Amino acid sequence: MDDAIEPTVDAGPHVLVVEDDRELSRLLGELLTDEGYQVDLALDGQRGLHLALTRPPDVLVVDRGLPAIEGVELVRRLRRQGVSVPVLILTARGTVRDRIEGLDAGAEDYLVKPFDVDELLARLRSLLRRHSEDADELPIGAGRLLVAQRCVLSPDRERVDLSQRECALLEVLARRPGRVFSREELLERVFEDADTPGSVDTYVYYLRRKLGREAVRTVRGTGYQIGTT
């Protein structure tokens, strides 16, 4: 069994910011990085589309007035490609009609410039929280857990199949990436017919054997949390 580690902060959610104002893009990148996010930046809609399709984020922040591909059109194209991650649109245009157009295109939220930084961060947290509760595809480090298919896809699309219990255990951890679960909690949520917390340890071992030792982290004296692999 792997050595336990002290509690640490996991690699944060991955956010893609598509904003053509270079100064604002830089400031958002620094702000979100300081808040623990993994950040990708794109200065036009074409680059944003490419990054969203090749390095899927957990949440997108998209400016409305983009070169190459306009922000609302970018959202439409992503939805047609099956990208379901939540989208927050930033815009200097705040009319009801503009908001309706953005929401109808597939965005979940809309924030008018100039905006308050704390409100932006709160909206991102809310989007991530709501999405993680319902999503069928969850981030596992740089890969993705496909819940319905019971497998993990690596960034290069290599597939690792999971048993029903392996998938259920990984799903519980992945839906609350910042939380540490005790063995007793995991036993109740995943192993209803098991007698001892040792069943949890066994399946953690199975997941690490398939996905790498950092797939699930041991937090000394507390339990387990999702890892970074």
Image (spheres, grey):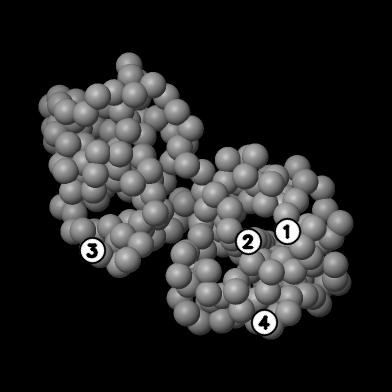
For discs 3 and 1, the disc positioned in front in the rendered view: 1
**Lateral position of residue 199 relative to residue 81, left or right:** left
**Lateral position of residue 10 relative to residue 215, left or right:** right
Is residue 74 something one can see in this rendering?
Answer: no
Disc 2 crowd rating (10 Å Cα; few below 14, some 14-19, many 20+) is many
Q: Are marks 1 and 2 in contact (CB under 8 Å)?
A: yes
- The residue tagged with tag 1: helix, strand or loop? helix
Marker disc for residue 93 = none
For discs 2 and 4, the disc positioned in front in the rendered view: 2
Marker disc for residue 41 = 2
The residue under label 1 is: 25
- Identify the amino acid type marked 1: Ser
First in residue order: circle 1 vs circle 2:
1
Between 172 and 31, the residue placed more toward the observer is: 31
Q: Picture coordinates of residue 229 (x, y %)?
A: 33, 46
Disc 4 crowd rating (10 Å Cα; few below 14, some 14-19, many 20+) is some
For discs 2 and 3, the disc positioned in front in the rendered view: 2
The CA span between labels 3 and 4 is 32 Å
- The residue tagged with tag 4: helix, strand or loop? loop
The residue under label 3 is: 159
Q: Picture coordinates of residue 39 (x, y %)?
A: 58, 53
Q: In the rendered picture of this protein, how many numbered marks are placed on residues?
A: 4
The residue under label 4 is: 69
The N terminus appears in which quarter of the rendering? Answer: top left
- Identify the amino acid type marked 4: Ile
Quarter of the figure with residue 225: top left
The CA span between labels 3 and 1 is 35 Å
- Identify the amino acid type marked 2: Leu
